[in-house]
Image (cartoon, helix red, strand yellow):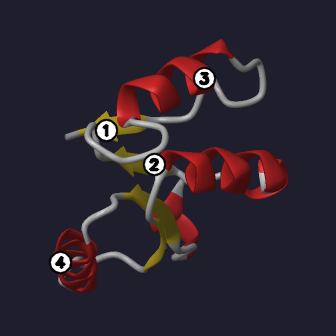
């Protein structure tokens, strides 16, 4: 999807268990010079449920915390890249 041509919002998903980090990230997104929608989830299980329930409207990019409870970022990445429907998702891990 080409966002600049039609001013379509850039859809960003953030998976991070730290509320302060989510808040900081949200503030950074507000500073972007492009329209953007931010959705956040706070652990890997919620992330995978969200992705699988929203296959028709996947984010343009996923920012994925490596260290999360219940299911960490590495486990999520393995699951994402093993899925035929999710494997093309752009993921940035930190």
Tag 4 secondary structure: helix
Classify mark 3: residues with Cα within 10 Å, few (<14), some (14-19) or many (20+). few
Tag 3 secondary structure: helix
Q: Mark 4 or 1 closer to N-term?
A: 4
Say which of 23 and 45 sits in front. 45
Q: Mark 2 or 3 closer to N-term?
A: 2
| Nearest-to-viewer mark from 4 and 1 | 4
Q: Mark 1 or 2 closer to N-term?
A: 2
Residue under label 1, please give it.
92
Q: Is residue 80 left or right of residue 90?
A: right
Q: Residue, x 28% and y 80% (percent of image)?
A: 26
Residue under label 2, please give it.
61
What numbered label is drawn on residue 20?
4
Distance in Å between CA atoms under marks 1 and 2: 8 Å
Q: Quadrant of the C terminus?
A: top left
Distance in Å between CA atoms under marks 2 and 3: 16 Å
Q: Is residue 53 left or right of residue 50?
A: right
Distance in Å between CA atoms under marks 4 and 1: 19 Å
Question: Do the residues under discs 3 and 4 have CB atoms within 8 angstroms?
Answer: no
Residue 87 pos. (x, y %): 62, 22
Distance in Å between CA atoms under marks 4 and 2: 21 Å
Residue 81 pos. (x, y %): 57, 18
Q: Is residue 91 left or right of residue 9?
A: left
Q: Residue, x 33% and y 58% (percent of image)?
A: 16
Query: In this rendering, is residue 77 above or below 33?
Result: above
What numbered label is drawn on residue 79?
3
Classify mark 1: residues with Cα within 10 Å, few (<14), some (14-19) or many (20+). few
């Amino acid at each position: 999807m080409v966002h600049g041509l039609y001013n379509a919002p850039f859809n960003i998903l953030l998976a991070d268990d730290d509320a302060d980090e989510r808040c900081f990230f949200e503030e950074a997104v507000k500073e972007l010079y492009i329209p953007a929608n931010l959705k956040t989830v706070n652990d890997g299980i919620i992330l995978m449920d969200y992705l699988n329930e929203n296959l028709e409207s996947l984010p343009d990019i996923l920012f994925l915390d490596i260290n999360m409870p219940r299911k960490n970022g590495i486990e999520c990445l393995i699951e994402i890249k093993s899925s035929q429907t999710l494997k093309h998702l752009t993921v940035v891990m930190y």
